[in-house]
């Protein structure tokens, strides 16, 4: 768990980026964050530098900090790599998973589906529960190093989705796609699990790249 002031600030700003409180291309003012979070400049600057390294913001010396505004090509390239990593995680999970991990994966998707059917699943709860599902799938690979990198990819994907199409439009389809990944992992079929995982990510990418300014307030240019 994050415990330092820098980590607290990082988590708070990440949430703002994902939900679109800070929009693509928008300036982020350090003084405003300091005031809102009741912290000093140092942890804010440290968090923003970390975001710059991870590709969320751009820092221009003597000018300021802005949220990135990626091109469609950048987004497409990102999801190619993200999808292939996700495929690798599922493939490894199919050969390395334990029964306990498999059962946990099934339970997570079952719970999301029940909430969805009840009409009680909010967009933010779906996002966090979906993240929990994918994290559990990654853990079936039993590779801490790859899991760490894929977690960072997930932050970026959530940022792209939250800033554009949002999470609600593909909730129900995502649950069926999760089931396909689970089936491959349960059958210990690496090809089936990997293909389902990559297809799931590719579908999100297609939705993002088909999104345009006439439908929402921002566009990927």
Image (spheres, grey):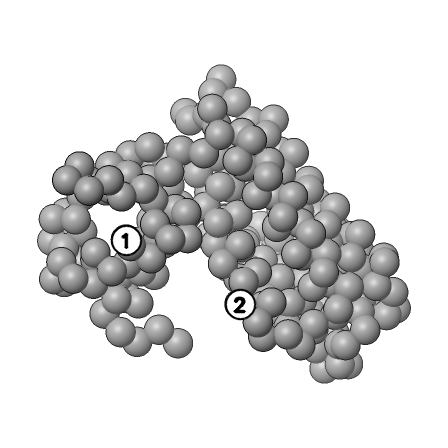
| Mark closer to the chain start, 2 or 1 | 1
Residue in view at x 44 percent, y 38 percent: 163
Question: Which residue, given by chain and number where applicable, does mark 1 sit on?
Answer: 48
Secondary structure at badge 1 equals helix
Question: In which quadrant will I find the N terminus?
Answer: bottom left
Report which quarter residue 202 is drawn in.
top right
**Dot 2 surroundings within 10 Å: few (below 14), some, or many (20 or more)?**
few
Report which quarter residue 190 is drawn in.
bottom right
From the top left corner, tell me how far across and down residue 40 is, in percent.
Answer: 12, 62
**Dot 1 surroundings within 10 Å: few (below 14), some, or many (20 or more)?**
many
Q: Does residue 101 appear left or right of residue 134 in this picture?
A: right
Residue in view at x 64 percent, y 74 percent: 143
Residue 131, relative to residue 103: is it above or below?
A: above
From the top left corner, tell me how far across and down residue 110 is, in percent.
Answer: 69, 64
From the top left corner, tell me how far across and down residue 25 is, in percent.
Answer: 33, 32
Q: Does residue 78 appear left or right of residue 20 in this picture?
A: right
Question: Which residue, given by chain and number where applicable, does mark 2 sit on?
Answer: 148
Query: Farthest residue toward the top?
Result: 214
Query: Farthest residue toward the front?
Result: 61
């Amino acid at each position: 768990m994050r415990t330092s002031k820098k980590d607290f600030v990082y988590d708070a700003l990440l949430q703002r980026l994902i939900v679109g409180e800070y929009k693509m291309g928008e300036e982020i003012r350090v003084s405003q964050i300091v005031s809102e979070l009741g912290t000093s400049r140092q942890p804010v600057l440290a968090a923003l530098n970390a975001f710059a390294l991870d590709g969320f913001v751009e820092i221009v010396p003597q000018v300021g900090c802005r949220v990135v505004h990626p091109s469609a090509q950048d987004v497409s390239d990102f999801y190619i790599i993200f999808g292939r990593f996700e495929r690798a995680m599922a493939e490894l999970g199919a050969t390395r998973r334990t029964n306990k991990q498999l059962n946990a994966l099934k339970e997570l998707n079952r719970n999301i589906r029940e909430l969805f059917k009840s009409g009680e699943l909010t967009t933010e709860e779906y996002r966090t529960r979906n993240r929990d599902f994918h994290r559990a799938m990654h853990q079936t690979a039993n590779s801490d190093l790859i899991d760490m990198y894929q977690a960072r990819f997930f932050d970026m994907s959530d940022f792209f989705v939250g800033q554009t199409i949002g999470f609600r439009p593909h909730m129900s389809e995502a649950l069926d796609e999760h089931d396909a990944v689970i089936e491959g992992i349960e059958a210990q079929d690496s090809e089936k699990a990997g293909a389902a995982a990559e297809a799931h990510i590719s579908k999100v990418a297609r939705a993002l790249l088909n999104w345009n300014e006439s439908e929402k307030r921002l566009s990927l240019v």
